[in-house]
Amino acid sequence: MSEDTRLSGGKALLFTIITCGIYSYYWAYLMGKAIMQAKSKKGLPADDNSVLYLILQIFGLGIVNWCLIQNDLNAISDKAAGI
């Protein structure tokens, strides 16, 4: 949605495995920034959740990050579809 090619799932998985999980913290932070950028492009209120995603990742709640990220992506998609 944000047209940022640094955030591909394959790269994130590979770098997370290579760095023994350290990259996942950086990825969570980047996703917050990318979603904020995508929301502002679509005219939605752009709240910066990157620090929230990072804190959740640090405390081992990565699955909560995925749910929040998916919810934000669904909101962006609904806005793009006019729903």
Image (tube, helix red, strand yellow):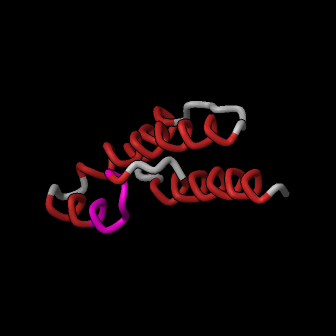
Q: Is 71 placed left or right of 69 in the picture?
A: right
Q: Nearer the viewer, residue 23 or 80?
A: 80
Task: Identify the residue at image location x=44%, y=38%.
Answer: 55
Q: Is residue 10 magenta?
A: yes
Q: Quadrant of residue 17?
A: bottom left
Task: Identify the residue at image location x=35%, y=48%.
Answer: 27
Task: Identify the residue at image location x=68%, y=51%.
Answer: 76
Q: Nearer the viewer, residue 42 or 67?
A: 42
- The number of callouts visible is 0
Q: Is 47 placed left or right of 16 in the picture?
A: right
For the magenta stretch, what is the residue range?
A: 6-13
Q: Position of residue 42 (x, y in %)?
A: 67, 42
* Quarter of the figure with the C terminus: bottom right
Task: Identify the residue at image location x=61%, y=38%.
Answer: 41
Chief secondary structure of the magenta portion: helix
Check the image and name the residue furthest to the right: 83
Instruction: Please tell me whether residue 68 is drawn above or below residue 52 in the rendered image.
Output: below
Q: Is residue 33 magenta?
A: no
